[in-house]
Amino acid sequence: MKAFATTSPYPVISLAEAWRCVAAHIHPLAPRRLVIEELVQGVGPAGSGYVLAEDIVATENIPPFPASSMDGYAVIAGDPAATRRVLGEQEAGSMVAARVLPGTALRIMTGAPLPEGADAVIPVEDTSESDGWMQARRGVSPGENVRPVGSDLAAGELVLSSGLPLGPAEIGLLAAVGHGAALVHPCPRVAILATGNELAPPGEPLQPGQIHDSNSYALAAAVAGAGGRVVFADRVADTEAALRAALSRALAGSDLVITSGGVSMGTRDLIKPLLEELGVVHFGRVAIKPGKPLTFATVGDTAIFGLPGFPVSSLVTFEIVVRPALRVLAGHRALWRPETQARLRHLLRHAPDRTEFQRAVVTREQDGNWASTTGAQVSSRLTSLVGANALLVIPQGVGDLPEGATVRALMIAQPEVEEGGW
């Protein structure tokens, strides 16, 4: 067994430098054409659906004919007749052979094509009908309650732009213009490896020295929330043979691999040496708290993030680095959680050697935003993330902050925006 290392071969780099490195090696996945039923399955939280990789242009006018926007009667607007003979009924989806002349009207349903000769629709609630005759209680103007040809979309009009995430409205528009499929960036396939001899599945009794595995499930949920798809997940013992085999399986069918644990400096921290052997380790330590051992490597075209084993460290590093990387793979332009400024409700302790991300609740008051941390901020205390809607960013070089001090807050419960980053 190897002895403890007393120094690391990896320099501690800034978070900004780390992100520049990640961004240089992560690119949107090659587009694929998916049918609309598949696109529907990809709709998740706001802004996290499949991302269009082509412009969608209307090939026909919508509506393609003048259409009624009300249930009522199609008439000639300038017709002075007090009562009008009802010629029949025009339903949506068909066209009756009728021409509206002065003194006549055609009963019409919402969305139905306007009959020849008519130029307006009187709403049914403004009329009465008896024995085939309609009496209107008010007049109408030409074009009233009629959707003109192309009033929703004109042929040749840009409907949806490349780079747009597909939510319910966008998918509805695709269907409306007759597109049964679209070219999109595929959902990133993610493999998750939780390493450690001490890990036991939830629901099983613990043996001496064991803990229940939480990282596998927390990271899988985080991946799903970011729009990724977990294709492989495993708990792996701290042996070189087991880790090598698991990494080989993970790399075989994924676009991104996430490991948790095994990236520090203990005798069983084997991830970095294996990644050096299999590919290129681009960085192995970042000046952040929690998450200093955060590691980024590539094996061929596949990116690998080695996250620390403590649950909070794992989820925080996912949030600030892995999540935006996943969104790049998926073709998104909005990568960053929105930021705000908030004042502290209490003293905040901070060692100035690293940029720290403290879990907090930010509330909006009449005099602005106020932040309270969620209690003890140790990396093993997963409850510090439960209920948190923000990460307070305390920069490197800054010490303790007094009550009332203004801090930068990442709003981790809100959809990403294009502005921001490290």
Image (tube, rainbow, N blue to C red):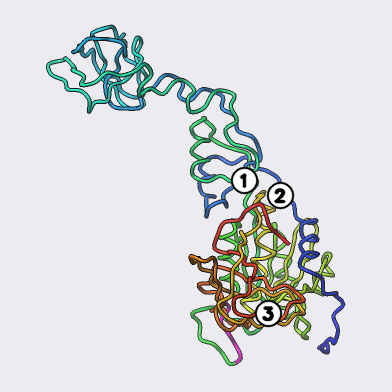
Residue at 65 percent across and 37 percent down: it is: 54
Whole-angstrom CA distance, mark 1 to mark 2, is 10 Å
**Foreground pick, 56 / 211:** 56
Provide the residue designation for mark 1.
51
Crowdedness of circle 2 by 10 Å Cα count: few (<14), some, many (20+)? some
Question: Going from the N terminus, do you reach mark 3 or mark 1 first?
Answer: 1
Q: Which mark is residue 237?
A: 3
**Foreground pick, 254 / 154:** 154
Range of the magenta residues? 209-214
Name, please, the residue furthest toward the left: 131
Quadrant assignment, res 283:
bottom right
Q: Is residue 85 above or below residue 352?
A: above
Question: Going from the N terminus, do you reach mark 1 or mark 2 first?
Answer: 2
Question: Going from the N terminus, do you reach mark 3 or mark 2 first?
Answer: 2
Whole-angstrom CA distance, mark 3 to mark 2, is 33 Å
| Element carrying mark 1 | strand
**In front of the other: label 3 or label 1?**
1
| Element carrying mark 2 | loop
Whole-angstrom CA distance, mark 3 to mark 1, is 37 Å
Percent coordinates x, y for residue 30 in the rendering:
71, 45
Q: Amino acid at mark 1?
A: Val
Provide the residue designation for mark 2.
28
